């Protein structure tokens, strides 16, 4: 894979270094990073560097280029990566908990891996609601992003997912996960990809959060640049709501599979968030919610649950893999 052409346009302004905990740790800007293949799997793929770069250089693309080249250059490299991420590979290469039994129409709810992991009760409520009221079924599968982020077999995984969907007559995928939405949207053209919030808007539904104070919103990595999903959420909320974005923390800590190599940086994200002592922390990514809760940030609220009035269906972190496996038989 060829390195992005505009890497050579770097003017060494160091805006990316100041913004990114990873680049700061190694004191390298994006051009220098492009020459550090040894750090390919240390980047959290959070997009923050690209957002501040005056030359639109993308550290995400740099990291992925080096990962793919490393995997393809030597079978030994591939085996080392597969060994290092063996549990991820085992579960998600050909998702072992996939379930297509609940396709009842051309439109399906696609929860992704971690909504079912952390919010099983809320997911059951959502699936029952959409099935009974809107004749929308469900599919349990992995979008392919976790494996693709390792630099392995992206096209094959997405193609197999697309083929499975088509064989079951699916023409619209309604995503609960922002990662699934942004990963699948540019890669699948034969099936419409839409977020749950856009679908609620299409159904003509509006909601009132009944919140008097401002909400502190943690923006998930894939939505940082366009904020398409955030804006879709605000479109279905009636009344004025004051949103204070948390934009000084690069990632929840689970982005880019980097935590394996950068546990200290990932812990730093958590500690910085804890230090804010926020009373009302809102997210719209189950992965973020799960990791925050796992690290004892207990006041995390998922916006989808708040919108649907099911905040009482709490996060279940301790049994995440069991929860995920359960939907294999749902």
Image: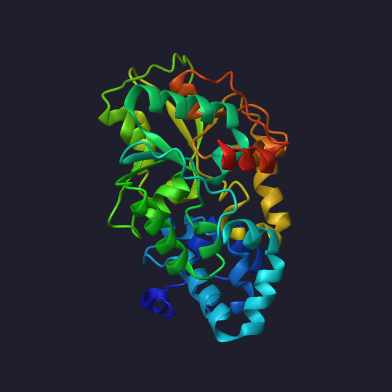
Q: Position of residue 134 (x, y in %)?
A: 33, 26
Q: Position of residue 221 (x, y in %)?
A: 49, 49
Please tell me in which quadrant of the rendered image residue 67 appears: bottom right
> 49 or 73: nearer the eye?
73
Q: Position of residue 150 (x, y in %)?
A: 57, 67
Count of numbered badges drawn on the protein: 0
- Direction from residue 132 to residue 255 in the image, left or right: right
Relative to 75, is 7 above or below? Answer: above
> 205 or 131: nearer the eye?
131
Q: Quadrant of the N terminus?
A: bottom left
Please tell me in which quadrant of the rendered image residue 186 appears: bottom left
The residue furthest bottom is 74
Relative to 275, is 257 above or below? Answer: below
Relative to 75, is 131 above or below? Answer: above
The residue positioned 59% from the left and 71% from the top of the image is: 40
Q: Quadrant of the C terminus?
A: top right
> 165 or 13: nearer the eye?
165
- Direction from residue 26 to residue 213 in the image, left or right: left
Relative to 195, is 162 above or below? Answer: below
Q: Could one spot residue 288 in this view of the protein?
A: no
Q: How is the image coloured?
A: rainbow
Q: Position of residue 281 (x, y in %)?
A: 57, 29
Q: Could one spot residue 246 in this view of the protein?
A: yes
The residue positioned 43% from the left and 65% from the top of the image is: 58
Please tell me in which quadrant of the rendered image residue 41 appears: bottom right
> 17 or 226: nearer the eye?
226
- Direction from residue 273 to residue 124 in the image, left or right: left
The residue positioned 37% from the left and 75% from the top of the image is: 6
């Amino acid at each position: 894979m060829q390195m992005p052409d505009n890497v050579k346009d770097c003017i060494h302004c160091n805006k990316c270094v100041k913004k990114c905990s990873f680049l700061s740790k190694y004191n390298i800007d994006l051009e220098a990073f492009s020459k550090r293949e040894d750090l390919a799997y240390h980047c959290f793929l959070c997009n923050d560097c690209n957002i501040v770069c005056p030359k639109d250089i993308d550290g995400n693309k740099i990291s992925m280029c080096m990962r793919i080249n490393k995997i393809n250059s030597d079978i030994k490299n591939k085996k080392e990566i597969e060994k290092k991420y063996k549990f991820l590979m085992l579960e998600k290469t050909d998702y072992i908990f996939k379930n297509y039994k609940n396709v009842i129409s051309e439109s399906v709810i696609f929860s992704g891996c971690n909504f079912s992991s952390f919010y099983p009760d809320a997911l059951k409520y959502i699936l029952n609601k959409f099935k009974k009221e809107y004749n929308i079924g469900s599919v349990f599968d992995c979008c392919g992003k976790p494996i693709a982020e390792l630099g392995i077999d992206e096209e094959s995984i997405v193609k197999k997912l697309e083929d499975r969907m088509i064989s079951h007559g699916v023409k619209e995928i309604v995503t609960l996960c922002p990662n699934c939405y942004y990963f699948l949207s540019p890669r699948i053209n034969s099936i419409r990809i839409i977020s749950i919030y856009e679908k609620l808007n299409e159904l003509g539904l509006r909601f009132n959060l009944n919140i008097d104070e401002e909400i502190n919103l943690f923006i998930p990595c894939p939505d940082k640049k366009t904020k398409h999903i955030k804006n879709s959420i605000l479109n279905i909320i009636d009344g004025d709501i004051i949103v204070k974005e948390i934009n000084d923390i690069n990632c929840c800590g689970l982005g880019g599979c980097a935590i394996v190599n950068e546990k200290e940086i990932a812990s730093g994200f958590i500690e910085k968030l804890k230090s804010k002592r926020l009373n009302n922390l809102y997210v719209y990514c189950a992965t973020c919610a799960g990791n925050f809760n796992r690290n004892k940030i207990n006041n995390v609220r998922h916006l989808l649950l708040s919108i649907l009035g099911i905040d009482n269906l709490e996060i279940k972190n301790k049994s995440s893999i069991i929860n995920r496996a359960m939907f294999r038989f749902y």
